[in-house]
Image (tube, rainbow, N blue to C red):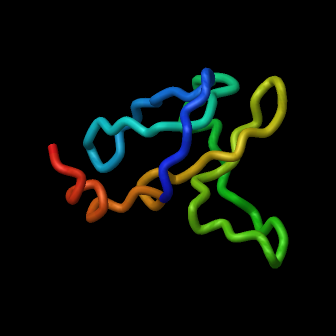
């Protein structure tokens, strides 16, 4: 991806992907929510033109539905291995 200017809301989120702690630079974070695995439901067929291969599931939270990314698919292990230790 091309370099972009970082703004005052840019931050690094730390996630565990493929057993490895990894930092991801994001434009902003709007909230942090604890979701238990039993609260995650599989993605149903949304619409014919919606790609769902990078989605883990949907969680029904008190303030609405949250769509969850499958970081194991978004960040393949081969790509992480080339980033170094």
Count of labels in the image: 0
The residue drawn where x is 56% and y is 28% is: 10
User: Taking 33 as reference, is 46 above or below it?
Assistant: below
The residue drawn where x is 63% and y is 43% is: 40
Q: Residue furthest left?
A: 85
In the displayed structure image, the side of residue 24 where residue 66 appears, left or right: right
Horizontal and vertical percent position of residue 55:
61, 57
Quadrant location of the C terminus in the rendered image: top left
The residue drawn where x is 55% and y is 38% is: 5
Residue nearest the observer in this picture, 32 or 57? 32
In the displayed structure image, the side of residue 43 where residue 55 appears, left or right: left
The residue drawn where x is 69% and y is 70% is: 51
Horizontal and vertical percent position of residue 80:
28, 54
Q: Quadrant of residue 33?
A: top right
Horizontal and vertical percent position of residue 53:
59, 68
Horizontal and vertical percent position of residue 60:
76, 36
Q: Quadrant of residue 72?
A: bottom left
Residue 32 visible in image: no
Residue nearest the observer in this picture, 37 or 71? 71
Residue 33 visible in image: yes
User: Taking 72 as reference, is 5 above or below it?
Assistant: above
Residue nearest the observer in this picture, 75 or 11? 11
In the displayed structure image, the side of residue 70 where residue 72 appears, left or right: left
Q: Quadrant of residue 81?
A: bottom left
């Amino acid at each position: 991806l091309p370099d972009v200017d970082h703004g005052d809301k840019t931050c690094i989120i730390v996630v565990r992907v493929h057993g490895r702690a990894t930092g991801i630079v994001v434009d902003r974070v709007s909230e942090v929510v604890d979701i238990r695995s039993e609260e995650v439901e599989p993605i149903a067929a949304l619409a014919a033109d919606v790609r769902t291969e990078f989605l883990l599931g949907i969680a029904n939270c008190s303030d609405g539905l949250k769509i969850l990314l499958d970081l194991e698919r978004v960040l393949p292990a081969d790509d992480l291995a080339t980033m170094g230790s």
